[in-house]
Image: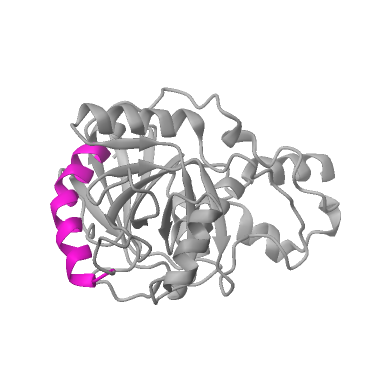
Amino acid sequence: MADTLRTIGIIGGSGLYELAGLQEVEHVQLATPFGHPSDDYVIGKLGAVRAVFLPRHGRGHRLLPSEINFRANIWGLKHLGAEWVLAVSAVGSLREEIRPGHLVVPDQFIDRTSRRPSTFFGNGIVAHVSFADPVCPVFSRLLVEVARAAGATVHEGGTYLCMEGPQFSTRAESRLYRQWGADVIGMTNVQEAKLAREAELCFATLALATDYDCWHESEADVAIGDVLRILEENVALARTIVAGVAGRLPVERNCLCAQALEHAIVTEPERIPEHVRHDLRPLFARFIERWERRES
């Protein structure tokens, strides 16, 4: 398969463990500097582009949200050539108008996790990337357009609150998050967004609303059986949207995502340990090559 093809990374969430429509399929098992990814990567052609698919929780849904090796997952997508990353995720709705079965393309996050590494940096290298606008506006807008064309009820923008889990919210928490202005709640996406930004990837979320969390007085409390039923109904739609987005990827990336690290690395290059350079080379090879030319 030609490496010159544009490459999209797709992270499948609950209910989306396989990606239909791939041709010339190969399975790639990676060992990364950060450990093992959630599963093998499935690589193939999706229309005129190259797709790299990874089930976030592993096939068979083996990993709790807090057990997911987010750094390994994103490192692997970057290493395999992805420039765009589409994360499909099940969420609870915190708004009356976001009904179960609706889709949301969030543009903001609130991080309520506490046990998860969220950066590639450290161990001798420091960087601070801008995260004020945590998703790619170009990619997210494309996602909204494709979802609407596919017949989905989709809400453009909104705040995704990422909780630790694996338990669902208490009623008090659910009401508090509504007061904060959050629109949907999930357990996975914020680490993916942070790491994708550090890896200079264009990131967007397709959130599938499965329930009203537990704040809604006239709706039943969250039950995993109901969540899975609505997820199953939305999986075919999600696959259609993924294929549609892949078919409309921009020829070039002209957004700021591709330059996120340009002024973010603050450590003096000569003080960065050699093993750290080696481990992070797939993430910012252009900087390392620049440093090496200067040092030679």
**Residue 149: within the magenta?**
no
- As drawn, 296 above or below 166: above
The answer to which image quadrant residue 110 occupies is bottom right
| Image quarter of the N terminus | top left
Tell me if 49 is positioned left or right of 199 in this view: left
- The residue sitting at 52% across, 62% down in the picture is 176
Q: Which of 245 and 99 is in front in this view?
A: 99
- As drawn, 57 above or below 189: below
- The residue sitting at 40% across, 76% down in the picture is 166
Question: Residues in magenta?
Answer: 222-242
Q: Is residue 10 visible?
A: yes
| Image quarter of the C terminus | top right
Instruction: Give the image location of residue 10, x and y in percent.
Output: 34, 48
Please, which residue is most extreme toward the front here?
Answer: 217
**Residue 229: within the magenta?**
yes
Instruction: Give the image location of residue 25, x and y in percent.
Output: 21, 50
